[in-house]
Amino acid sequence: MLTRHEVDYVPPLAEGASKNDRYIELRRYVLALVEGETDWLANLANVAGAVFEHVPGLNWAGFYLMKGGELVLGPFQGRPACVRIAVGRGVCGAAVAERRTQVVPDVTAFPGHIACDARSRSEIVVPIVVDAQVVGVLDLDSARVANFDIEDRRALETIVKDITPVVDWRAATRG
């Protein structure tokens, strides 16, 4: 396990590293980043940055947080994004409404897709559930069609479960 002092430099994975190896390293990195840190903004910003750096093919990675009954943009990496998303609208809104991870191989075929970045072709959105309430989502976009699969879903759901207890979601979702 990495310590907080070792997270400043994480050597890059070999070019041919498997997806599984990338996610093992990402999880180690995320756990080290959030260890002992209580600030929700710092934790979500670091997780977004770590995901953006470790998952190949991304053009956007970040969080949307539930505030006032809608998703509001949180910490992210990538181009500027849509600020507010209604529950049930787009891939993020569907993840909240259905309370399950959405893996969309081709966003142009997704009914009601919200095109925050015209380059995006596939998307995965993992809902964050605390005390039976969806408090936000982790959203990843790729310029590649079908960039995400079951392995991504499982790994990202695990990372969301790892960070859920260390984030002050009340502070993060305060309107």
Image (spheres, helix red, strand yellow):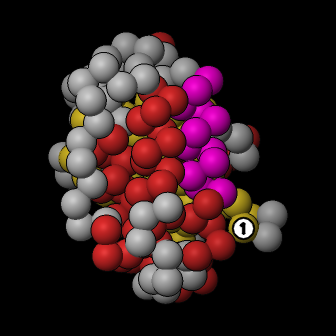
Residue 116 visible to the viewer: no
Q: Does residue 46 lie above or below 175 as drawn?
A: above
- Going by the image, does 29 lie left or right of 104? left
Kindly identify which residue carries mark 1.
Answer: 130
151 in the magenta segment: yes
Please tell me which residue lies in front, 106 or 82.
106
Q: In the rendering, at what x and y percent does residue 77 appear? A: 26, 52
Q: Which residues are magenta?
A: 150-161
Report the predominant secondary structure element of the magenta stretch: helix
Residue 78 visible to the viewer: yes
Q: Does residue 40 lie above or below 140 as drawn?
A: below
Q: Does residue 76 lie above or below 90 as drawn?
A: below
In this view, the residue farthest toward the right is 132
Please tell me which residue lies in front, 9 or 169.
9
The number of discs equals: 1
Q: Residue at x 58, y 39 (%)?
A: 155
User: Which image quarter: residue 57?
Assistant: top left
Q: Does residue 162 lie above or below 156 as drawn?
A: below
